[in-house]
Image (cartoon, rainbow, N blue to C red):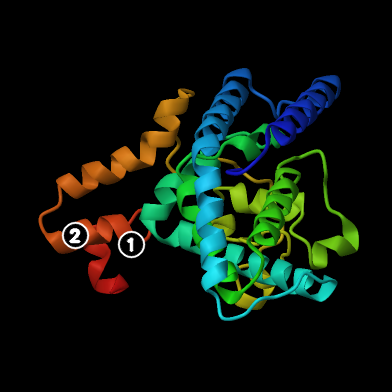
Amino acid sequence: MERLTFIQYFLFIGIICLEGFLNLRHDRREYKIKDTLANISIAVLNWMIGLFITGSVFIVLVKLQELSLFKFETSFLVCLILFLLSDLIHYGFHCLEHTCRFFWATHSVHHSSDSYNFSTALRTAHTNRLYRSLCEIPLCILGFDAFAVVVTHSIMLTYAFFQHTELVKKLGWLEYFLNTPSHHRVHHASNEKYLDKNFGGVLIIWDKLFGTFQPEEENPTYGLVTPVKTHNPLKIVSNEWIAMARDVFKSNSWKERVFYIFHKPGWKPAEENKDV
């Protein structure tokens, strides 16, 4: 959740408290105190850093829009096209986050909790904002209004927050085209059949088109395949970067170093022959 206003954070904290109350009332155990505090601490750190970079990113987007060959006037059709393209680009970049360790080092923070609730949505590393702008740059270059691009992204982030809950089961016919809490629970699970599935943002249609869709069947087990055994926010956000640096320094060649950084997460030199 890399670009959210103070009002959005305040609203989300209120919703988290409500979900926590409902969990206690129904004797559920989705919330763990240390895990939730870690999520909120990471969110606050993310928001504070975002205050310094969001304005600069917007200025760059405006400059890119000014250089574009086309200028799209705001209309319902243009907004619809902008939304579909934004969601498609989000899908593609989300796939990249799971297949390139450099990006996974940041994105893995969001997957590192073994609980699944609204507070999990706020568990996003501050470095996420630095490269998520790559999703917005092509849209501004195409000629879409920079402010419209930013607002569209903000709406998508708000929608994503509400996917992170176990209180909502399946939503009937909406499951066919929307990325629902059920679909996103699959994405956060470490069950073998659920790994690297359901990358969609608002829509699930891209996963169905490109073969990455998996319905929720067995109960999800949340968290990373190799768990992060700490509730320290700084250790959580730096865990995969440190592990990657360790692998790079122990490498025997520059080729191995490059592969450790840009190949899929979990790549080992022994896999080179079958993966290249």
In the rendered image, the quadrant that contains the C terminus is bottom left
Q: Is residue 107 shown above or below 50?
A: below
Where residue 223 sits in the image (x, y, percent)?
Answer: 54, 40
- Residue shown at 49% from the left, 42% from the top: 53
Where residue 41 sits in the image (x, y, percent)?
Answer: 55, 24
Q: What's the residue type where badge 1 is placed? A: His
Q: Which mark is residue 263?
A: 1
**Left or right relative to 262: residue 67:** right
- Residue shown at 73% from the left, 46% from the top: 158
Q: Is residue 211 shown above or below 112?
A: below
Dot 2: few (<14), some (14–19), or many (≥20) neighbours within 10 Å?
some
Q: What's the residue type where badge 2 is placed? A: Glu
Helix, strand, or loop for circle 2?
Answer: helix
In the rendered image, the quadrant that contains the N terminus is top right
Helix, strand, or loop for circle 1?
Answer: loop
Q: Judge by depth and name the residue closer to the eye, 251 or 274.
A: 251
Q: Residue furthest bottom?
A: 69
Residue 145 can be seen, yes or no: yes
The CA span between labels 1 and 2 is: 10 Å
Where residue 228 sits in the image (x, y, percent)?
Answer: 44, 33
Q: Residue furthest left?
A: 252
Place residue 35 in its image quadrant: top right
- Residue shown at 24% from the left, 67% from the top: 272
Q: Which residue is mark 2?
A: 256
- Dot 1 or dot 2, earlier in sequence: 2
**Left or right relative to 161: residue 115:** left
